[in-house]
Amino acid sequence: MKITKVEVFEFICEGKPFFRVIGCRVHTDEGIYGDGEAALSYGVGASAAFGMVKDLAKLVIGMDPMENEVIWHKLYRTTFWGQAGGPVVYAGISALDVALWDIKGKALGLPIYRLLGGKFREDLRAYASQIHQGFGPVHEVKKSVQDYYDITKQVVSEGYDAVKVDFMCYDENGKAYTYEDRKAMLLPRVLATFEERLAAVREAAGPYVDIIIENHSNLDALSAIQVAQMAEKYKILYFEEPNSPNVKTSKFICEHINIPLANGERIFSRWQYAPYFENMALQIAQPDIGTCGGLTEAKKICDLGHIYDVSIQAHACGSPISSTVALHLETAIPNFIIHEHHLCFLHQYNKDLCTMDYQPVNGRIKVPELPGLGNEWTEKAMAGAVKATVE
């Protein structure tokens, strides 16, 4: 079997100019194809990811798609920017790599998790992610303490027993907090607002629902410690991205708090993860399979973390492809902790990109049993996308 063509897509999500999904479809001479995603759908970088997938695709034409390790090594070693690379180059590698796993599963008639070693669990515990922006088909900004209480009640009533919340996304008036609001030591009023919201979420959730603090790396080491020490009494499952990813500051924070730290959506490849594990500078690793180097690399990161008793929650905030591949990885590793079900997977513009819509039931979600990924880009989405073809 040989790779004959790669199609690269920038999917158009109507009314969502800041959500730009970059995907690919890898074709073979046997008619089997696979789909992948470069998971830079938000923030700045989608157009760069589109170009990177297109550039890397030229290097895989004519290669055997079953040899994912050989292809990965070529993309890493012969592109100059692959070694010690950042999000754009690794997102490009990731998209192609996931598509190769999809091809391999389809060719063998097996779901990807079987190729990774089997199923450790029949279904996965999932948490409701980003509920401070609502948790339904419409994006909402949560401002008041009552807003935080009500959305938590809603999510718990749907069967979730874990939620993730950014308590410093917007102030009481719905205005986004700035860098000045978050640096060094937080002002007493800002910290009080944080605690009022956190207390409301805990009250609404009750004692048996886990709370994850989301932070998007917006604090620094001092304010992160300040927040964690305040939050400890609310029984937090873990504190995500407390500050800009840095091994030394992460270790410093760990030494001054009693809440586990999570990080990883902005850490790429096993080489960047290794010092965090070696220094015990995080307790939950969150590799994004669409940016860390693909499934081939993500499995290595998980295995490396397992040596140090680090738990895994794959980061997923893109198209349903990103969520689907996360399920395959998470069910096939022993050190899984919980699955992220992001609010973007509830929005119709995102659901329309893929053929399958996998949703949790009572806070649990099953891994697909179809060959390969068990999900594909829809014909409609591909027809409306900006497209480049490499042959």
Image (cartoon, helix red, strand yellow):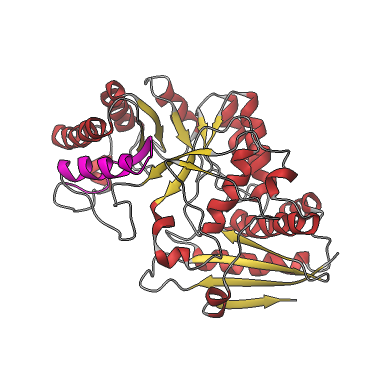
Residue 214 visible in the picture = no
Q: Quadrant of residue 333?
A: top right
Please say whether residue 146 is one of the residues in the magenta stretch. Answer: yes
Which residues lie in the magenta part?
145-171
Q: In this picture, is 213 found above or below 265?
A: above
Indicate left or right for 210 with 281 as reference.
left
Q: How many marks?
A: 0
The one nearer the camera, 60 or 245, is: 60
In the image as oriented, which residue stretches furthest toward the bottom? 383
98 shown above or below 364:
below
Residue at image coords 46%, 44%: 340
Q: In the rendered structure, does residue 66 fall within the stretch colored magenta?
A: no
Which quadrant is home to the N terminus? bottom right
Percent from the top left, x then y, of residue 220?
34, 36
Whether residue 257 appears in this view of the structure is yes
Residue 170 in percent (x, y) is at: 23, 49
- Please tell me in which quadrant of the rendered image residue 209 appears: top left
| x 50%, y 27%: residue | 281
Q: Is residue 7 above or below residue 316?
A: below
The residue sitting at 77% across, 64% down in the picture is 60
Return the residue nearer the eye: 86 or 330.
330
Q: Is residue 112 left or right of residue 167?
A: right
The quarter of the picture where residue 254 lies is top left
Counting from the top left corner in percent of width and height, residue 149 is at 21, 40
Image quadrant holding the C terminus, namely bottom right
Residue 281 vs 42, above or below: the answer is above
- List x then y, in percent, for residue 154: 27, 45
Locate residue 47 relative to residue 101 in the image: left or right: left
